[in-house]
Image (spheres, helix red, strand yellow):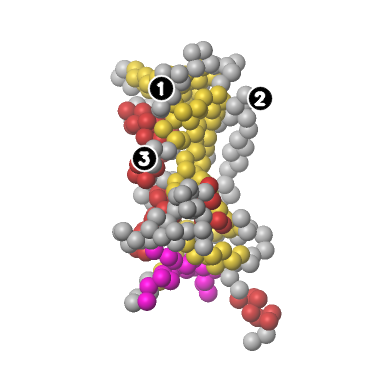
Amino acid sequence: MSSSATEAEAPDLVCQMDNVQGIVDALTTVRWKRHQDAVLELSEHGVVLIVEETGCLQAKVYLQRELFIRYEYGAQGRPRFGVSLGLLVDCLNTFSVPGRSSMIEMRYPGPDMQLLLKSVDSLDACIYAEIRTRIPDTISWDYNFEPAGSTPLSFTVKSAALKEAIDDLEWPGSSIQIMLQPVPPSVTFRGEGHGDLQIDFMYYANTDLLIAFSCDRQVSYRYKYKFLRATTSNIPSSVIKDNRGSKLTIGRGGMLKVQHLVSVSRQSIPHPHIDSAGYQQPSRIAYIEFFVKPEEDEDTVND
């Protein structure tokens, strides 16, 4: 076979991962409904999965190449293709074995532009899966997240406390107001239904819950509850168990960015990304970002 033919058949990406459950946890974080389409974007830096809804909510899962034990990228540009998020998660779950870390290989494209998955660490059997891909229907909307000013409007709160607060504010079809104020430094979540419910995080009084806070002026925006809830409804139990924090930032125009960190470290066997003291380097973390557009509200208070 000629070298040119070999090059033509070379896949865009061949990669191997050694913690399937960690990847499943990361992808499940952005799965807010049963039937959901996603776009995968490949690059020399890693894999990004993008999901969105009605131009008001977008989420991204960043799987940096350092998360993979093998990452061979041969594409020109950045290939993008659509998949069913539910099907992808269910397929990956097939490779996940409770109590042990499973190693799988992911390859794209297959002969018919499929996403190919197979197990590579078992001598007794091999699990193989093909996922049909599609051309993305739409181009992801430009969230254009920009700082709201010279001082960031942000706060970091324990993920468990954030999830509990949003769950407590549930009222079908309602909106949630998020207000930051510098004096006293605090964050307020306020929901309206048959009555009003307000949850306050006071920075100095609850530093164990409200870990960090940055605000130089009072701001207030409303967000549709179903979109806000999507940012926390599927936070993995591992994040809650590790007592991690989630960071929320309000950008120009009220765009809300919610960031979570999901561990994809391999627990059972030492890995070069984990040192002798057990310190987990940042490269073994999957980064999750949600972007939520605010509701149009003439009464919104912003300086």
Region in magenta: 102-123
Say whether disc 3 or disc 1 marks the residue closer to the N-terminus: 1
Q: Quadrant of the C terminus?
A: top right
Q: What distance separates the C-alpha of mark 2 from that of mark 3?
A: 32 Å
Q: Earlier in the sequence, mark 2 or mark 3?
A: 2
Q: Of the residues shown, which amino acid type is indicated by label 3?
A: Ile
Give the amino acid at mark 2. Ser
Query: Secondary structure under badge 3?
Result: helix
Judging by the rendered image, the residue that carries numbered circle 3 is 240
Q: Which mark is residue 150?
A: 2
Q: Quadrant of residue 128?
A: bottom left
The correct choice, above or below, for 191 with respect to 260 in the image is: above
Residue 9, located in which quarter of the rendered image?
bottom right
Of circles 2 and 3, the one toward us is: 3
- Residue 32 visible in image: no
Q: Nearer the viewer, residue 162 or 145?
A: 162
Q: Secondary structure at mark 1?
A: loop
Which is more foreground, mark 1 or mark 2?
1
State the image coordinates of residue 186 (x, y, percent, origin top left).
Answer: 47, 19
Q: Amino acid at mark 1?
A: Asn
Residue located 44% across and 30% down the image: 157
